[in-house]
Image: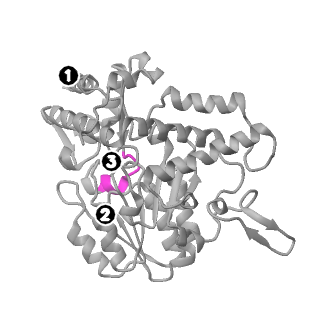
Amino acid sequence: MAIRTLDVAAIRKDFPIFETGIAYLDSANTSQRPRQVTGAMLEYFEKFNSNIHRAAYRIAEEATVRYEATREKVRAFINAASTKEIVYTRGTTEAINLVAYAWGRKNIKQGDLIVLTIIDHHSNIVPWQILAAEKDARIEYVDIDDRGELRRDQFAELLNRGPKLVAFNLVSNALGTINPAHEMVAAAKRVGATVLVDGAQSTPHQPIDVRALGCDFYAFSGHKMLGPTGAGILYGRREVLEAMDPFMAGGDMIKTVRVEETTYHDLPWKFEAGTQAIAEVIGLGAAVDYLNDLGMDAVRAHELDITEYAYEALSDVDGLTVYGPPPSRRAGVISFSLDGIHPHDLATIADRDQVCLRAGHHCAMPLMTRLGVAATARASFYVYTQKDEVDRLVSSIKEAQRIFA
């Protein structure tokens, strides 16, 4: 079956921010939101603003229905077996912390090995460092090769040591590297490890099937996939979640509270204490609808086309170094450095041309150390990115080189 082609010009009309003339090349940081998403949230505020799961009047029931409808949309979007496996969080960071606290503190013991990778985001490093220090466990990191891809030989060697947990990103936010997640999960499961996959940079850009992937946990954020900030997802296999204690305690995560003891709610509400980000969750559901209408195969095909174009254009610039693998093995992220020009200076000059470019360590300081740089510039693309925006970036780069010559 032929893959649909995105009508990018039509898509951009759904995003009012592009009427300002900016070239937005920072979608790996946070994506823009279409009117369909902000409209769904505004409808909640204006027509049925109320709390969920707590009242019998009509607008509260409507809020609850819309809120829970997102759970089913997400379940289908990532092909989870049940909505009981879909836990709302504030984002990938909170989802990983939930696992570190609720699963990790119950299962990680003294001397246990945790395997991470050198290209992981801080959100998939720091929680495990805190846990390892508390439990006197060990952490080892899988290195990368000269192409910015994980060393499979080293990963296999670490698996031979019998890790208790393996956690890695499906797509690197700093390099764009697409990791061979299916093979890595299968190999880790063969040695009895629990596996968490950070899907923050993969879920917005390619089809995801968590059952085919076979991981125990999968985390992602709404704000990187056209949705609002403050709404994210933790997928967990039902039997694993059932065995975990709550992450937070309070209202709505209980069945009964007595002075002697408390009985916890069923999944997934056991992990959703307090009033949730209701409007944001509804907005996330609208974002899933939007992406489903586009088709995730088409999203990936467009991203690959833009990435190939940008990779070639940037590689032709004298004094510019691109980090990471070739376009066919990376997502829509390109990190690079310019001889004699700090990434922050480049980003400032690009901003004068209304080109939004990320500069810094990208919450991946261990990777920057591994690359031998303090920071890089990063361009990242999404469904609304056009090739002329890449051309504008190249023009800004050449202007920076002229200024610093």
Task: State the separation of the CA atoms marked 2 and 1.
Answer: 46 Å
Residue found farthest to the front: 1
Residue 18 vs 264, above or below: the answer is above
Marks 2 and 3 in Cβ contact (< 8 Å): no
Residue 316 at least partly seen: yes
Quadrant housing the C terminus: top left
Frontmost residue, 63 versus 222? 63
Quadrant housing the N terminus: top left
Left or right: residue 181 versus residue 227 is: left
Magenta span = 361-369
Numbered badge on residue 174 = 3
Indicate the secondary structure of the residue bearing disc 3: loop
Indicate the secondary structure of the residue bearing disc 1: helix
Pick whichever of labels 2 and 3 is earlier in the sequence: 3
Q: Dot 2 surroundings within 10 Å: few (below 14), some, or many (20 or more)?
A: some
Give residue 182's quadrant in the image.
bottom left
Give residue 183's quadrant in the image.
bottom left
Q: Which of pointers 3 and 1 indicates the residue nearer the eye?
A: 3
Numbered badge on residue 402 = 1
Indicate the secondary structure of the residue bearing disc 2: helix
Left or right: residue 321 versus residue 19 is: left
Numbered badge on residue 182 = 2
Question: Hey, what amino acid is under mark 3?
Answer: Ala
Residue found farthest to the right: 259
Residue 366 lies in the magenta-colored region: yes
Question: Hey, what amino acid is under mark 1?
Answer: Arg
Q: Position of residue 246 (x, y in %)?
A: 65, 66
Question: Hey, what amino acid is under mark 2?
Answer: His
The residue located at (57%, 74%) in the rendering is 105
Task: State the separation of the CA atoms marked 3 and 1.
Answer: 27 Å
Residue 54 vs 359, above or below: the answer is below
Residue 244 lies in the magenta-colored region: no
